[in-house]
């Protein structure tokens, strides 16, 4: 069963160009996984009378998991590793699957382990 993960990367104090660069790095790393596709989230039309880019357009990634049994777990593990290896200002990657949200940040490993286990337990067929 194919599933889609919607990811949103944010970094404290970062401008759109910096977030775009970081998103590109993470997207390339996720593309190395056994997933069907990794691409930018489709741009949404800006509301009337507003300017600028939608934040999800710049920091958004759409991951199509495909048939692999461990798709969600592999993506979450890769994101956690990427966050741990990339020093700098506080970063958060928001992972959404079917309306369920997991926010990964530079929190302690124990805290993230508990959150990841809970998230994956709610999506057994997509993990």
Image (tube, rainbow, N blue to C red):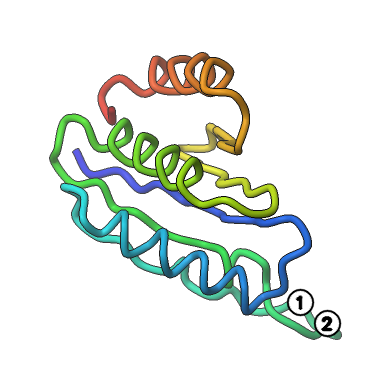
Work out whether residue 33 or residue 37 is closer to the camera in this orientation and state it: 33
The answer to whether the residues at label 1 and label 2 have Cβ atoms under 8 Å apart is: yes
- Residue 80, percent from left and from top: 44, 37
The single residue placed furthest to the right in the displayed view is: 49
Q: Is residue 26 left or right of residue 95?
A: left
Which circle marks residue 47 in the picture? 1
Residue at figure coordinates x 50%, y 45% from the top left: 83
- Could you say where residue 110 lies in the image, as x and y percent from the top left? 53, 15
Instruction: Determine which of the numbered discs, if any, sits on residue 50 in the image.
Output: 2
- Frontmost residue, 42 versus 114: 114
Q: Nearer the viewer, residue 37 or 2?
A: 37
Q: Is residue 90 left or right of residue 112?
A: right
Mark 2: secondary structure: loop
Where residue 107 sits, quadrant-wise, is top right
Q: Quadrant of the N terminus?
A: top left
Where does the image place residue 2, in percent across and percent down from the top left? 23, 44
Helix, strand or loop at mark 1: loop
Q: Position of residue 116 (x, y in %)?
A: 46, 23
Is 91 drawn above or below residue 40 in the view shown? above
Q: Residues within 10 Å of mark 2 (few under 14, many from 20)?
A: few
Instruction: Please tell me which residue is depicted at 86% across the width and 85% down the height of the picture.
Output: 49
Instruction: Say which quarter of the image contains residue 26.
Output: bottom left
Residue occupying the point 76% across, 77% down: 47
In the image, residue 5 above or below residue 123: below
Q: Residue at x 80, y 82 (%)?
A: 48
Query: How far, Cα to Cα, is label 1 from label 2?
Result: 6 Å
Side (left or right) of 20 relative to 120:
right
* Quarter placement of the C terminus: top left
């Amino acid at each position: 069963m194919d599933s889609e993960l919607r990811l949103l990367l944010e970094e404290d104090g970062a401008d759109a160009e910096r977030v775009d660069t970081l998103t590109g790095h993470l997207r390339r790393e996720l593309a190395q996984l056994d997933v069907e596709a990794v691409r930018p989230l489709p741009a949404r039309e800006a509301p009337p009378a507003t300017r600028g880019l939608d934040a999800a357009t710049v920091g958004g990634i759409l991951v199509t998991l495909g048939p692999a049994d461990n798709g969600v777990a592999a993506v979450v593990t890769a994101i956690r590793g990427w966050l741990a290896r990339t020093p700098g200002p506080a970063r958060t990657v928001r992972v959404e699957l079917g309306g369920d949200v997991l926010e990964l940040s530079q929190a302690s490993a124990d805290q993230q382990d508990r959150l990841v286990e809970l998230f994956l337990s709610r999506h057994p067929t997509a993990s």
